[in-house]
Amino acid sequence: MLHVLYLVHDLSDPAVRRRVIMMQAGGATVTLAGFTRSSAPVEQIAGVVPVDLGKTSDGRFAQRLAAVARAALTLGSSLKGVVRPDVIIGRNLEMLALANRAKALFATNVPIVYECLDIHRLLLRRDLTGKAFRFVERTLGSNAQLLITSSPAFVRQYFAPFGQMNLPVELVENKVLELVEPEMRATGSSPAAGEPWKIGWFGALRCRRSLELLSAFSRKMEGRVEIVLRGRPAYTEFDDFDRFVADEPFMQFHGAYANPEDLQKIYDEVHFSWAIDFYEAGQNSSWLLPNRLYEGCRYGSVPIAMQDTETSLFLRARDIGYSIAEPSVKALAGLFDTIDAERYESAREKVKAQERETWVFDQNNCRALVERLGRLTQSYGQGTILQVAA
């Protein structure tokens, strides 16, 4: 059975739990180690008791670097008793550094996988700071054997043009983990006469511009459109998220949810999913394919995207959803002026008509991922790297 050492930057991130379950479902055993950003300690994830490497803070990059440096010095004692892994995965750049350190500690040819699901803005700077960070990434990545990423645009817009890494790429999109196909199907429908349309913005809530735009838009529509928020707000990105939402007449925040357990319920309660992020507009936010895209579409919610982003290209290729030309109240109001029950049901049926595999990562996909990781151990021992199409 393949043994994976998974090093993560935030043990409290729900996406970490999903990835651990995916590898377990594929037949791997997982040793998990990482930092936490939650106020409470993370005692277990999918039955795995993690190795706690310390606490870091969202948005405080210098503090995170210092924490990584401390963890590197004590990693030997932190991993004491851990059986030699077959593969080490570092989830983002800081954990790639620790993956290199762990490989040295195990003193063996353990292949490293770099899992990069966001391109940090520091890596895209054209000044000496950006060049320094890219140099560090190239240096650390020279010991890796595989790059896992979630959007082809990350390769197309960053890794290839910047010449960062000459690695095989495994595209693992942010699909809904569905090990058993649910018996129920999406039950949502157009609102009854006099009831509002509802837009759901779920997941990692970190975009102040989206919050302000949805606030102004819902006020403009005077109750004809309501905004439903769920997930984990990045409080460092907002002046006072809770008060802001509490003061909004047509906006509600319902807290965190379990993924994938709660997805059907929460998406059945809305008509549209907000698949827009301006957090790093023109860069990472324009290139990613967010979790909420797959989650919403899996359960029949019609996505709203921003034109000229990877998400809008994804939707256009499948002739589904809506894209707005500019991030303005006028553009959103113009879109909703054209939507009635008949047009909405037509848009929703197009989403529901897509193949399940478009939105879902199932048991077979889990096995294929673990098999892909397993082949690294074989090829690495032979001094070769298998090429995988992105």
Image (cartoon, grey):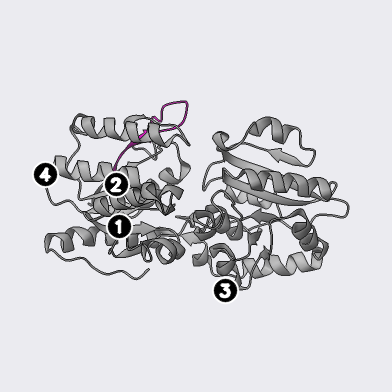
* Residue identifier under label 1: 370
Magenta residues (range): 30-43
Cα–Cα span, label 1 and label 2: 19 Å
Residue at the spot of label 4:
107
* Discs 2, 4 touching: Cβ within 8 Å: no
Residue 301: which disc? none
Looking at the image, is mark 2 or mark 4 nearer the viewer? 2
Single out the residue that lies furthest toward the right.
194
The residue to which callout 2 is attached is 96
For label 1, the SS is helix
Of label 3 and label 2, which has the lower sequence position?
2
Q: For residue 31: magenta?
A: yes
Q: Which residue is mark 3?
A: 317
What whole-number distance in Å separates the C-alpha atoms at marks 2 and 4?
17 Å
Label 4: state its secondary structure. Answer: loop
Instruction: Pinpoint residue 291: horizontal percent, then vertical percent.
Output: 52, 53
Instruction: Decide if residue 389 is in sight here.
Output: yes
Residue 372 placed where, x, y %? 28, 62
Residue type at numbered disc 4: Ala
Whether residue 12 is situated above or below residue 99 in the rendered picture: above
In what element is the residue under mark 3?
A: helix
